[in-house]
Amino acid sequence: LSYWSADRPPDVPRGWPTAPPRLVAEVVHGVSEYNHAILKLPYYLECGVDVVWVVGLRRQSVEVHRRMDHPDPFDPWEW
């Protein structure tokens, strides 16, 4: 799930947008899906996504990751 705001809309009417969304929500059910979402997290934040939610269905939890809260530049091997 992705969300674009009015001040940063997607730049194409059709196809894949090149502007990053404000929010990405990764909904996960198990451990392997959670691990995959966490591996993608630095890439989302590096490309300009402001907030990433990792929603755990089994755990009934939401982790919030903000770009301003993470070190820059991103090294996926340090996460």
Image: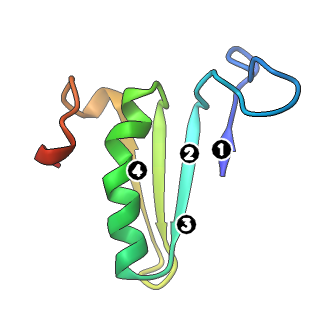
The residue indicated by pointer 2 is: 24
- Disc 1 on helix, strand or loop? strand
Chain-order first, disc 4 or disc 2: 2
Q: Which residue is identified by label 1?
A: 2
Q: Amino acid at mark 3?
A: Val
Color encoding of the figure:
rainbow
Q: CA distance from mark 2 to mark 1?
A: 5 Å
Which of labels 4 and 3 is toward the front? 3
Q: Earlier in the sequence, mark 3 or mark 1?
A: 1
What whole-number distance in Å separates the C-alpha atoms at marks 4 and 2? 10 Å
Q: Nearer the viewer, residue 2 or 59?
A: 2
Mark whose residue sits in front, 4 or 1: 1
- Residue 20 position, x and y percent, is 58, 27
Q: Position of residue 57 (x, y in %)?
A: 52, 79
Q: Which mark is residue 27?
A: 3
Mark 4 or mark 1: whose residue is earlier in sequence: 1
Q: Which residue is mark 4?
A: 64
Furthest-right residue in this view: 13
